[in-house]
Image: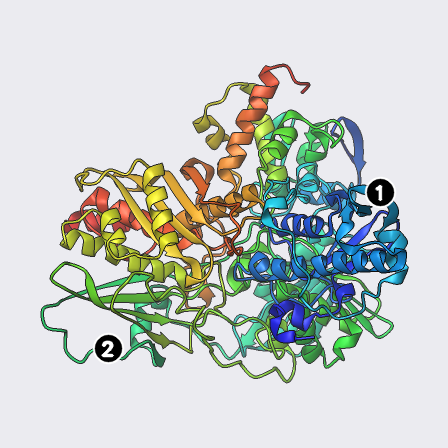
Amino acid sequence: MNTLTLPPLLAVNPRLDRWVGFPSPGRVAVSTGRVEIGQGVLTAMLQIAAEELEVAPERILLQTGDTDLTPNEGYTAGSQSIQFGGVALRLACAEVRALFLDHAAASHGYSRGDLAVRDGAITRRGEPTGLDYWTLAAGVDLTRHATGQSPTKSVGDYRVVGQSAPRIDLIAKVFGGSAFIHDMVLDGMVHARVVRQPHRGAVIAKVDEAALRRTAKGPIEIVRHGNFLAILGTDETVVEAVAAVAPNHVTWDGDDPINPYQEEARWLLQQPSIDRTIGPPPPAEPTPGTTRHEATYTRMHIAHASVAPSCGLAVFSGGKLQVWTHSQGVYPLRDALARTLKLDPAVISVKHVQGPGCYGHNGADDAATDAAVIAFQQPGKPIRVRWRREEEFGFEPVSPAMVVTAHALVDGSGRPADWTTEIWSGRHTSRPGGGGNLLAAEALPDPPPHPPAVEGGYPPGAGTRNGEPLYDFPARRIIHHLIAETPVRTSSLRGLGATLNVFAIESSMDELAERASQDPVAYRLSVLTDARARAVVEHAARMSHWQAGLPAGTGRGRGIAFARYKNMAAYAAVVAEVAVDEVVRLTRVWCAADAGLVINPDGAINQLEGGIIHGASWALKEGVRLDAHGISSRDWESYPVLRFSEVPEVIVELVDPLADRPCLGVGEASGGPTVAAIGNAVAHALGARLRDLPLTRERVMAALLRA
Amino acid sequence: MEPTSFTVNGRPANVTADRDTPLLDILRNHLGLLGTKFGCGQEQCGCCMVLVDGRPEKSCGKPLSTVAGKAITTIEGLGTPEQPHPLQQAFLDEQAGQCGYCLSGILISAKALLDRNLAPSRAEIAQALDDNICRCGSHVRIMRAVERAARLLREGAAR
């Protein structure tokens, strides 16, 4: 076996029975380490498995995100589920099919080339043999390691992949079934709410337990361990009401006020930073014949703000800890819990249950840890922790504020001869590892050390993600200033640094086109040779009936932007149309995307549409507010998001979705280009450019006054 | 404590609980109807929307005492997979959802709209759903699904 040829996820989970099994006649068990976070991945995985195993999708029992059952695929993140997880599953399924055909041929003296599988049954020259996966299963050892050498079906033979199969999870959600972790009910379940440390390192000075009990309309239990404080009870209404007022009855030492000015990103420019350059060193002097272009763009902290607050359940019984979570990574969470509770990972089971839409590292891991810490203290009691809305807004990790300056040396033809994207940002990755970066762990006695700020390798980068333009500039580099200390906890959110980097690059491309008196589409195409990139730009322009030379400053505008997510996933070009008076009204958005082979076209379009509306919400509305105590935007009024009446018409088309090309991750592809296209459309409408997000009424008014 | 009587999805309910208990908690924790969701507890997101005597109301801020004698309709009262309400059929046909957490509240708001207007414009649909937050960005599909449901209803599908 040559493991070097295996895709990484098959190499770390080589046993075939970790992926596929035949538990009972007519049934196939398929496992994926990927989890459903609202993106439809389970349906796509089912299609991949059905296609390669040649069985009807209805036969498949899909197991997902369970440390007892499924492969360890790390995190469901980074638009990598299909591009990497799907590839591993496809190869594993193809190999299982091949092993059964080999066995059928060998055991019955058939010629291997005459055999095929049709809905789980073995056929010989198209005729039934009476054999099938289930009758042969005893003779095929699936504990063997994958070789990755079995041929997969050719794209032209696909019957399931490439079809817009309906989402398997939607039915329960439309008919009001028990669909989410919030809906789990365990026998004897105890509800719990945590009284959060106001900030890392805060120490409980006093808990007025008598006052807490007086406010309670029923029995409660108060649990304290170090600076971890929780209210427990069997009546959720009672526990919730006490938790809402509990902060008034707990005092903390070690007050550590922050500077609310830090809600705007420019404070980053004054901070000490860890600096590095990716690419050639910047020129000491501008090249002769070039002129300098420089523009700075900013973004506030952004909240995940899932529609429901985080939830976790746990029970510690007989020396074993069972945890239910909507985390993106059951295995990493298991290891982090083991370190936090000083338990052997082997006694911990972590199972994924669906939660509200997840766009990155939110409060899910923390809520699960809250439940696990309490359950560990109270053996035998099933504990359910559901965060309060204020808690979700106030304590989930947020996406860091960022500043990006685009520097270009522009040659005589108006094109950049040298390009620098200079980035200032807090950390974009602080997922739980080593027991750190979990709120409950930090409140326990002997908290783990604060993990150092890290950026991660480039590509794909984190804060640096998409910092390198895909255009044919002779010299390109990223200068990255990683700010280690931020006023609030930050981590990954859909797109990571790509959102502001694409905004900065694509806004600058429009500014440079204007300097060169060229149309933004034509200007981009003049510096873009990547054929697939050109195709999506041209496709989006066609879809939107793009016209060059429309006058600026009329109050109506349109803008285009393009990026290939991470410079290695799906390509997307977006055209936005706006009408601006005092506020920006987004009227229409067109998007063309190339995601390579698409498993489920409607699912991919749904993701791109979601990214467009999510991006529009970032561009027009979102920014975390701070006060001296931390995050002050703790409800939907102080953290507004795009509402139905503000949503544009959205038209998405896929370029060549059934062509035989590798799958490219699509979940985060449209956000950055949408934000940038809106910025360009607003600049076109106003005849003046706004470089600070979000593009609120106040900022529009200020720009109009300046103009 | 005196029991409070009302109907849920046409069936009588008698609940003995503190009269300040939010209707949402009554539905989920006392009556075991888990289709109505908790989103914010502040009447801002619409996840907990139910019909009270036909009007859409956020159940998270509605004390039990205020629903005595009223008729409550929850998502469970719309239809079943075997006999879906046209709205539910249309949401499946349009694949109108991503995480789906907001959908029960949205379906209730949409039902309230279609109960009084069988030919709503896109703007009227958006207005009717503006109290509901969808965070995944399924809005366009959702509005298309409401239009499709209205069409089904106009064509005489069972309500």
The residue to which callout 1 is attached is A128
Relative to A175, A513 lies left or right: left
Amino acid type of the residue that numbered disc 2 sits on in the rendered structure: Pro
Amino acid type of the residue that numbered disc 1 sits on in the rendered structure: Pro
The colour mode here is rainbow
Residue A214 spot, x, y in % from top left = 69, 60
- Of A115 and A190, which appears nearest the observer? A115
| Tag 2 subunit | A
Q: Which residue is drawn at 20% across and 63% down?
A: A416
Vertical arrangement, residue A316 with respect to residue A572, above or below: below
Tell me which label, 2 or 1, sits earlier in the chain: 1
In the structure shown, which secondary structural element does the residue marked by tag 2 occupy?
loop
Q: Is there any visible trace of residue B101 in the rendered image? A: no
Q: Is there any visible trace of residue A80 in the rendered image? A: yes
Residue A644 spot, x, y in % from top left = 46, 37
Q: Distance between the residues labelled 2 and 1?
A: 69 Å
Q: Which residue is drawn at 64% across and 25% down?
A: B86
